[in-house]
Image (spheres, rainbow, N blue to C red):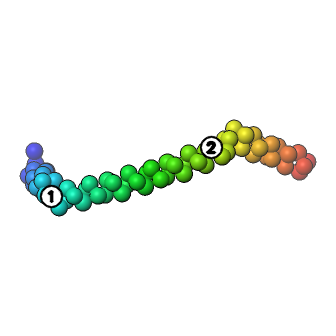
Amino acid sequence: MSILRQLAWSAFRRAAANPKIQRKAINTARIVDKKMNDTADKVVSVAAKTDPMREAGRAFGKFMSNRDSKR
C-alpha cells in the first residue's frame, strides 16, 4: 500500500471514530432520507394522476395530426 493511501486511510479511520462527525453523518442521513421520502411521495402522486400510455398516445396523435395538416 502506498504511503499516501495509508495516510488517507488512517485519516479516514480517525475521522470516522470522532463522535462529532458521527452525529453529523447521522443528522445528514436523516435529512437526506426525509427529502427522498418527500420526493418519492411527489412522484407517486404525479404518476397516479397521469397514465403514461395515454399521454404517449395523445402526443403521437398530435404529431400525426399536425403532420397531415401540413400536406
Closer to us: 21 or 65: 21
Residue at (20% x, 56% y) in the render: 22
Amino acid type assigned to the residue bearing label 1 in the image: Pro
Above or below for 21 versus 45: below
Q: Position of residue 38 (x, y in %)?
A: 47, 53
- Where is mark 2, residue-wise? 48
The earlier-in-sequence mark between 2 and 1 is: 1
Amino acid type assigned to the residue bearing label 2 in the image: Ala
Say few, some or many: other residues with alpha carbon within 10 Å of mark 1 (under 14 / 14 to 19 / 20 or more): few
Residue at (26% x, 54% y) in the render: 26
Query: Is 64 left or right of 18, judged from the image as shown?
Result: right
Residue at (89% x, 51% y) in the render: 70
Asked whether the beta carbons under mark 2 and mark 1 sit within 8 Å of each other, the answer is: no
Question: What whole-number distance in Å separates the C-alpha atoms at marks 2 and 1?
Answer: 43 Å
Closer to us: 52 or 35: 35
- Secondary element type, mark 1: helix
Q: Is residue 12 visible?
A: no
Q: Position of residue 44 (x, y in %)?
A: 56, 45
Closer to us: 52 or 49: 49
Query: Is 54 left or right of 15, judged from the image as shown?
Result: right
Residue 51 falls in image quadrant: top right
Residue at (10% x, 53% y) in the render: 10
Query: Is 14 left or right of 55, judged from the image as shown?
Result: left
Query: Is 55 left or right of 11, judged from the image as shown?
Result: right
Residue 53 falls in image quadrant: top right
Q: Is residue 40 visible?
A: yes
- Where is mark 1, residue-wise? 19
Q: Position of residue 64 (x, y in %)?
A: 82, 43
Q: Quadrant of the N terminus?
A: top left
- Secondary element type, mark 2: helix
